[in-house]
Structure formats: structure tokens, C-alpha cells
Image: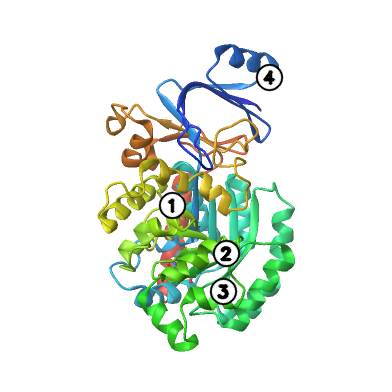
Amino acid sequence: MPILFSNATVLPMTASGGEPRTFTGWVGTDGDRIALATASEADAAAFRAAHPGLREIDCRGKLVMPGLVNTHCHAAMTLQRSYADDISLMAWLHDYIWPFEAHQTPDDVKLGMTLGIVEMLLGGVTSFVDMYYFEDRCVEVAERLGIRALLGCNYFDTNADEVLPRVGEAVRLAAAGSGRVRIAVAPHSPYTVSPENLLRGKELADRYGLHLMTHISETQDEVRIVREKYGCTSVEHLDALGLLGPKTIGAHCIHVTDSDIGTLAARGVTVSHNPQSNMKISSGVAPVERLRAAGALVTVGTDGTCSNNDLDMFEELRTAAFLQKSATGDPVALPAYEALRLATANGARAMGYADGELGVIRTGALADVIVVDMQKPHLQPVHDVVSNVVYCGKASDVETVVVGGRIVVENRRIGGIDLPELYRGVAEAVARIKAAE
Ligand SMILES: CSC[C@H]1O[C@@H](n2cnc3c(O)ncnc32)[C@H](O)[C@@H]1O
Ligand SMILES: [Zn+2]
């Protein structure tokens, strides 16, 4: 059903160039696309007349903007939220996360993924990039809840023979759905996956035309391990193997040399910056401003809820901006509009959408749109709407969410989801997994 958002403050965003002006007006959808973005009441009236039976949503005092794109996540790790805090990445993985994950069933992952997607949708995330296991369950949940997703089949050396032969099947499963959910190949990292298995993943990605995603240069420990094994940096290692290209998404990229930065930019790699996870695990600060200056495509992700510990992208992009200002000693670093662009238009590009096709509000773009209620104490007054969104916004300010022209959240409710039942199921699964450890 076509939708008309009326009397809204509209923040269109742009894929490149300067800031477009916000305007007061109307945004209309038809099918999965935006069919109207106008300040003209006459155009809105014509749209109404041409679309009898449309759903009109009064957005007085509200902001209509593109949905947020989370480019690095392990959504099913909601099961491990606050399970292992205040320790280093290596101890966290070896002593807590991997033992916990060893006892998870596909249905547990389905529950964790459901909780993660519910949290993201309610917080205005309309697209996400994920790396985890049991992709068939993840495809099923993403399709059911209506979010847009790029789901990476994660593997290590230990399970490459099990995961890689299933990639083709996952691709076919996703292709049979709505088109909003796609599959990617996801070797865990250059320190846990051998060159041979990295190349097997790359071969599959090329064969099916898929994205490839991995963790890159996340900690000093990684840098040391990779240098000891291969005599070079993680970026040099992956580049020598031919793994870096425009369809590669590298999470973190913290401990990178000037030459690595040049390589990431030259190859067109997406760098998913995950500031809260990096701060919490004390991994370091990614050189976002230097990456941007070199021309790299930088985006924002939350990482999993065991290292964050939530999936609030408003918080995340605020942290991204604050962290660059703090780390560089320059208050001008990563200004509000640029931070928001990382989490909208840049994220869309990272997922393979053409500039202007997603992550912006313009006629012809995919209709992934959110309505933010600005009638909140922390969002008033509005000297600058972008500043308010980036520096004051919260996931809980999102009222309505539309993905591909379909309403998936309305008045902060997701149809067909019984939240108390979901929380009970999650608690039971977690209790069983912990008892088995
Ligand atoms: C790649 S998902 C599968 C695998 O990776 C683990 N993991 C989650 N977050 C991180 C991170 O920030 N760095 C390294 N590994 C991570 C996750 O628990 C799964 O085992
Ligand atoms: Zn991660």
C-alpha cells in the first residue's frame, strides 16, 4: 500500500557533496520505492489523488529521514549481551564467547537473531551487515521481520569444510525470498583463517558475485600474530591474497599504517568503524579521519552486543563523532552531517547499492524510511536538526519504520512479535547453554 508521510521535517541526506537543506513537506512511497519528496502541497494533493487508498501518516513535529545502516554486527550475539565484560578481545573470545557458542543450537541462533533484529528495527536500523552461523535461520528471521540484510557465512579454519560447501545453498535460499536479504562470505579474520581458506572464500565470493567481509587489524595482538606468521600487516596479507576490493567489508581497521590506509582506499574496501566495541574492548581508535581523507569508504557498525552492549546506531554514530574529535584533538573532526552520512548513504554503498538508490530520501530511491519523534525533552529546541539527531538522538526516539515501502514498525510496535514470549524464550535458551558449559 502506498504511504504518504505528511507535514514532516524531511532530512534527505546525500550520497556525496554538501548538505542538502531539510524541508517541511511530504514523502510518498509506491511499491518499494520513494515516489514523492516535496515541499509542495499541490504535489502532495496530486499524489493523494493518484494513489487512492494510500496510508497517510501525519508527521507534524516529526522528522522523516533515511533508515540507518549498521555495517558490522553479530545480531544473534544478543544471547551473550553482558555475559563477558571488562576483558581483552583474546580472553573474551577464548574463555567466554567461543565456549558459549559451542553449545548454541540453530534454534538458539534464531532466537538471538530475532532479538537483535527487533532491537535494531525499533531503533531505526533498516539495513544491517552481519557475520554469524546458521545462515538459513538468519535468512528466515530477516525475511520474516522485513529488515534488509547482508548475511555473512562466518568460518574459521576449524569449520571451513563445513561452512563453505553450504554457501551456494544459502545463496539460493536468500534469492528465493524478497530480494532484501543477501548472502556474503565471511572468513573470521586473517589471524584465525589460513591463506588457503581465505582463498577458498574469495573463490566462492567471485563465483557467486558476493561480498566478502572479515575483521581486519582489530587489536595489537592481531598485528603481532599476523606479523609473526606472515611477516606483514593484516592489510598487506589480505591484499597479497587478492581479498581486498569494492565488495570487501573490513570491520575495525584500527592498527593500520599509512600504506595500509592507501591500500584500503585504492582497492575501494569499506571500513566499518565500530567505536563503542573498540572502546569497550580497548582495541584502539580507528583513524577514521585519515581513512576518509585518503578516500576510503567509511561506515559505522555496532559489532555484537557482547562488546557494545547494544545495537543503538544513534549512540554509535554519536560515539564515532566524539571519538574522532577526542582522538585527533580537533573539534571539527567528523562533523555531525558526515557522521550521519557514514550511517546512511555510505552504509548503503557498502552493501552494494548505487549512489542515490538507498540511504537517501529522493524520488526513485528504495523506500527505507524512519520517522523520529522530535517532541522529546532531549530533542528540543531544534537549532539544527542534524545536530539534534546525531548528538542527542536515541533508538527509542524512532516511532515508525518502513523498509522497501512496507511498514515494519508502527508506533514502536512490530506486528506479529510477542515480546514477553521472545524474552522468555531467550532466557530459557541462555540458561540451558550456560548449564551445558
Ligand atoms: C565473525 S562472527 C563469528 C565469530 O566471531 C566472534 N566475534 C564477535 N565479535 C568479534 C570481534 O569484534 N572480533 C573478533 N571476533 C568476534 C563471534 O563470537 C563468533 O565466534
Ligand atoms: Zn565483529
CB contact under 8 Å: marks 1 and 3:
no
Residue 437 % position (x, y): 42, 77
Disc 4 secondary structure class: loop
* Residue to which mark 1 is pinned: 423
Q: Is mark 1 within 8 Å of ligand 1?
A: no
* Circle 2 residues within 10 Å: few <14, some 14–19, many ≥20: some
Disc 2 secondary structure class: helix
Disc 3 secondary structure class: helix
Disc 1 secondary structure class: helix
Closer mark to the observer between disc 1 and disc 3: 3
Q: Is residue 215 above or below residue 182?
A: below
Query: Disc 4 versus disc 2: distance between alpha carbons?
Result: 45 Å
State the colouring used for the structure image: rainbow
- The residue under the point 28% across, 58% down is 327
* Residue to which mark 4 is pinned: 51
* Residue to which mark 2 is pinned: 267
* Circle 3 residues within 10 Å: few <14, some 14–19, many ≥20: some
- The residue under the point 40% across, 48% down is 312
Residue 323 % position (x, y): 30, 55
Residue 415 % position (x, y): 55, 38
Q: Is residue 379 above or below residue 251?
A: above
Name the residue type under label 2.
Answer: Arg
Choose the circle earlier in sequence order: 1 or 4: 4
Specify the quadrant of the image occupied by residue 129. Answer: bottom right
Q: Is residue 7 above or below residue 357?
A: above
* Residue to which mark 3 is pinned: 239
Q: Is residue 199 above or below residue 17?
A: below
What number is the disc on residue 110? none
Q: Compare residues 87 and 50 and report the one nearer the observer.
A: 50
Query: Disc 1 versus disc 3: distance between alpha carbons?
Result: 43 Å
Choose the circle earlier in sequence order: 2 or 1: 2
